Amino acid sequence: MIAYGKQDIRFDDIEFVVDVLKSDFLTQGPIVPKFEEAISGLAEAKYVTAVNSATSALHIACLALELKPGDLLWTVPNTFVASANCALYCGAEVDFVDIDPQTSNMSVELLERKLRISQQSGKLPKIVIPVHLTGEPCNMAAIKKLSVEYGFKIIEDASHAIGGRLQNKPIGSCEYSDITVFSFHPVKIVTSGEGGAALTNCPDLDRKLKLLRSHGITRDLDLMQHPTNDAWYYEQVDLGFNYRMTDIHAALGLSQLSRLHEYVQRRHEIAARYDQEFEGANLHKPYRNPINKSALHLYVIQVEPLQHNGVFHKLRESNIGVNLHYIPVHTHPYYQKLGFDWGDFPNSEDYYKKAISLPMFPTLAVDELNYIIKTVKKLCDE
Ligand SMILES: *Cc1c(COP(=O)(O)O)cnc(C)c1O
């Protein structure tokens, strides 16, 4: 079966990980800060906190922005559940803004409409999480403008988007957001095994993120309530977690990061080939805004709802490991118990009835690509 996404682990990666295994520190050593520095450099964000997953990064990002019980967080329904669950971890409430059918990202028009209505009922969100689905950047400038008008904070869920650009800036620069989150899960653009990062330009938020990552404990005299110079002394000043990334994982991530641009370039070559071959085919190609650069985590075609199930299953039967991103979050049983239901967010539900993620990863072989293209075209024409 050709997977829809797959990591590329090379000899250099393995050697670097083995070096860490032979070193004094498996965790809390020198490699995590090096990985953070490398991310900061390429994403052009001042501060980076590496953690054990993007889910953890989303959780502490919400806490750093002081999301509390009684508060409200909005995200899109067509995302991985983690973009919404982070609010529930904080005891806050979640609601959704439907997507724009053209871009498949958060609709600015629907966001504005929902904000206007919510202002009248006095229930505005504290945080909005736009998701750069497939790596295609959201319209961040417009969302930022609304955040100023309606007073909400922004976390970019850039789990799909490291290596992409929003106009002239790398994704992660936080030009239009308070915090940006990356994922280093093996199916994403670069991997650390499991892992994530929270990026910000605000020193206060950075301080909170780093405290929350590790039990809320500090050894920094400036952050202590009762500072002493006793060598053994530390203080717990907040309720944090153990969300630390190990040096073993950071070594893999750092080694992978050196090939980020090569990986994104290869993804663009594959997408260009799909685009060209699907010209005039009986399917809808994914949207890309030429002013941005997608990291192309996924290549999602849309087919007619009546064909969807058949094409999907026949592709799997042909050993092409297609996938579906995503089952709308609000339709999961857990969210239905919270009061959501089918019909609440029709654009996301419509997308779900059409979308198929084709294989997209840097080591996809040319003969595999040819086979996928031929099979997709044939099945869509039936
Ligand atoms: C993968 C993913 C996450 C969670 O990432 P983990 O590192 O697996 O916790 C969150 N949001 C989106 C959009 C994702 O694709």
Image (tube, grey):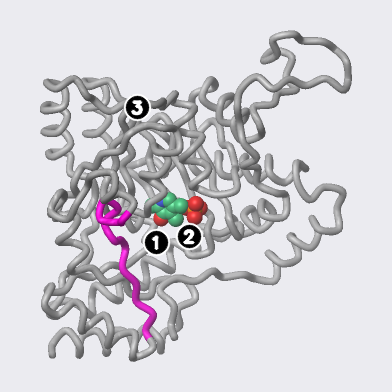
Do tag 1 and tag 3 residues touch (Cβ < 8 Å)?
no
Tag 3 secondary structure: strand
Q: Give the residue at x 39% y 26%.
A: 69
Q: Give the residue at x 37% y 47%.
A: 165
The disc placed on residue 153 is 3
Residue 47: horizontal and vertical position, in percent?
A: 55, 32
Where's the N terminus, which quadrant? bottom left
Crowding around mark 2 (Cα neighbors within 10 Å: few <14, some 14 to 19, many 20+) is: many
Magenta region includes residue 38: no
Residue 214 seen in the figure: yes
Instruction: Please give left or right for residue 139 compared with residue 254 in the image.
Output: left
Q: Main secondary structure of the magenta part?
A: loop
Tag 1 secondary structure: loop
**Residue 366, above or below 349:** below
Residue interval drawn in magenta: 320-333
Name the one closer to the observer, 22 or 91.
Answer: 91
